[in-house]
Image: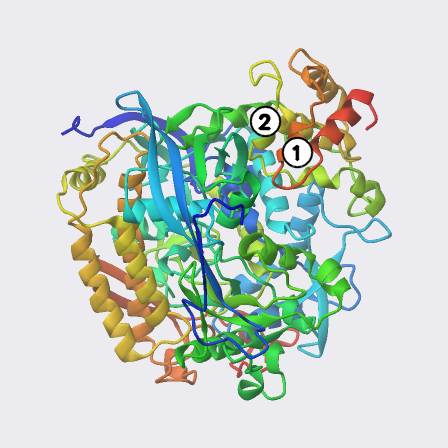
Amino acid sequence: MGKKLQIHSTISCDVLIIGAGGAGLRCAALLHEKNPALSIFAATKVAHPQKSHTSTAQGGMAAVDPRDKTDKAVFHMFDTWKGGDCSSDQNVVRKIVDGGWDEVRWLERKGIHFSRDEGGGISKRQFGGHTVDFGKGDALRAVFVADRTGKGIMDTTWGEALKGGSRFMNTTVVTELLFKTKEGEFVTVLARATVLATGGSGQVFRITTNCRNNTGDGTAVVLRAGLPLMDPEAVQFHPTGIVGPGILASEALRSEGGILRNRDEEPFMERYAPKMKDLAPRDIVARAIETEIRQGKGVMNPDHQIEHVWIDLRHLPDYVHEVKLKEVASFFKTYANLDSRTQLCPVRPSNHYHMGGIPTNEHGEVLTSANAVLPGLFAVGECACASLHGFNRLGTNSLLELLVMGRCVGERVLSYLTEKRAPAPKGAGEATLGLFAGYLEAQGGENVALIRQEMREVMTRQVGVFRIEKGIEEAIAALISFKGRAAKVGIATKDLRMNQELLERWELDNLLDNSMTIAQGALMRKESRGAHFREDYPERSDEFQHHTLVSMTEFGKVAFGKRPIDLSIYESGGESYERFGIMSRKY
Amino acid sequence: MNGSGSCRENIDGFVKNPINSDGRIKIVTKTYALTLNIRRYNPDRAASWVQTYKLDAGPILRFVDLFRRINVEQDATLAWASSCEHAQCGSCSVNVNGRPMLACELLVENAVTLFGTTTFKIAPVSVAPLVRDLVVDWEQAYERVHRAKPYLIKPKEVPAGMTEHRISPQELARYEEATRCINCFCCAEACISGNRTFIGPNAAMAGIVRLMDPREEEKGERLDLLYSEKGIYRCHSSKACSHVCPKQIDVAHFVALAKEGAF
């Protein structure tokens, strides 16, 4: 057996940011701008901030240009409220929508390479669910950096944080305000304020567009600290992920005329949405594909062992493949070796985004209950839930959120920094050392990757696009058995330096914790709302017109709370307030 | 397939259903018997060795999928790096038969075609210090990009009466390709100039982009770095950088522009 685990050193700083994606580093950039003397540490699980998941966002960032004569902030607020199935907090919606264009200007001044129109201005494009005049027409509202908007935002926020003097702690994870690094050391970090910006937990599902590192570490650490998560059951599935790498094949495929076909090549959307067919909203298309697969009309990909349907683009003119759909067509070529001009391409619903997360107020301050703030702890980005997106996120709203909220959290942190830095509490880190020593000492023949694979299968099948009481209960029972098996994983690599086995063992616990809250939330919410669809309760119910708060005392044992959904736009009686009541989500 | 004889073609062997009389969707399953000779390194014992893994894999599995399968089926201790797994983050660069590539976009079938073999030697990149097996310390490689200051050192003021700068699509097009760089360091790995003496193609390009960006006012400092001891005169114009770039960026073109001073 190796050396006894210990805390290697203690670092002090003013602000610790955990997670160095777009949200975390926008916050860092604001802090540097306002107070260059601050010492800021940004810890990231990946090898460098530029490797963050933010870099993979493609399409655009929604923001209403105040000079635009056709678009108005109130239209964007309405779309977000309606898209979220009346479950967004309206104070947050107003704040983020109002702050959008300032962020576009900030990015542009800091050197982002936005795509330009002929006059040299910033180009804009249309995106699903974004309308003018309360649904009457399409809005040109998304600014973009070709097909790599997230990368543009990541490069800009990373550059600004670097310029300001942020210290990056790469390949570093949070275990309880304690860190494990590639040097194999545990470090205590004492900060006056801490910002959680750890991103999503898409790896809970087998089929996901999320990167390998999105294992819900931040949300799991919060849960283990006894704090609640909000709306974990609100998980978005994109209808057409590309089988294999799980990249999104955007809606553009269908808006350009792509047709979904099942095993028998039948254009099945005609049966599910006779009028809209392949252009029906995301959730309807996702459920239709899932139904076909469940009825045995899917196709099994022999290499990845994933069932899928086809998207048929063969009838589209060459210029559509070569110009309009260039990027997606190249994905099919690169990852499936298929030519979309002559061959059918495999797609299926894929986990994409978690609307729920660590509950915060509109300033990004972490809440311990419906209305009590935990001083000094902030959360922002996908790991947080303020909630802008309610139960269903509109495309291009997540990049908007991480920038506006990143800045707002930075401003809030500044006002908080008058507090003195506290010494490390007695016994700090002991829980972490005990946890990791336990992993290293455990004996048994179980394999982390195998348990993880089974867990992701169960979550995809039972707590995915379709949910039903019996299925969710089976998933919960399976999760408990996985937890038991996980205790019997023996780890051969004992040295701590880049110990992938140990890291993945810890990630497995995080994934299981996240899965359990998703499943329990889905079981409790006996209704369908936004992306959460219960076959046994297919309608939305006013009884559940509130946010879920869920905390977990021990694995599988959960306690629920409620948090009211903010209706301040509606209640203000201001411009078009009547549009912000509870309405049905029909398009 | 490049006739190593180890590819078993099994038409209709796996999925029986979707074969129409006209044969439009034929699910063809193939299996390649692969040999991966992977360079291992254990920092605890400072031990280095080559380990051979044999596995059968279908044509569109990627090398990251193979590593994952080795972890599940054969050896949980093999450490390898990846994150986004669709060529957008550049964490999974490795040398495959001596060529730096992204493991996330290398399909088995394409690798067999490219190298004409089903045996692959996989080694970590040497452009950054080795940590374990295929995992390197990217932080140290990034030091060079940081030295090139990947941000506007002195951003130009937005002209009075305007809210943003105007940049025409034509002007942007001159340097837009270079902004697609993901810092996977494949170019630096392939570069025939030494990593110790040359700042490297990608870091040089990070500076060149901002020299071409009309919003950067601090040109002098950037030129000082580019024309310094570790700057672009270390480049021998082999164009290896452009040849291996997974994003198909013509890196050598930008270095050539810098040599000419044609920003």
For disc 2, the marked residue is B190
What's the residue at 30%, 20% (across, down)? B46
Measuring from the top left, give residue B118's x and y in whole percent: 45, 42
- Report how far apart the C-alphas of labels 2 and 1 lie in the structure: 9 Å
Asked whether, in this view, residue A91 is left or right of residue A494, the answer is right
**Amino acid identity at mark 1:** His
**Amino acid identity at mark 2:** Ala
Q: Quadrant of the C terminus of chain B?
A: top right
Helix, strand or loop status at disc 2: helix
Q: For mark 2, name the chain.
A: B
Measuring from the top left, give residue B137's x and y in whole percent: 44, 28
For disc 1, the marked residue is B243
Q: Is residue B60 above or below residue A128?
A: above
User: To which quarter of the image does residue B136 belong?
Assistant: top left
What's the residue at 67%, 72% (across, down)? A255
Work out whether residue A27 or residue B178 is closer to the camera in this orientation and state it.
Answer: B178
Residue A558 visible, this orientation: no
Whether residues under marks 2 and 1 lie with C-beta atoms below 8 angstroms apart, the answer is yes
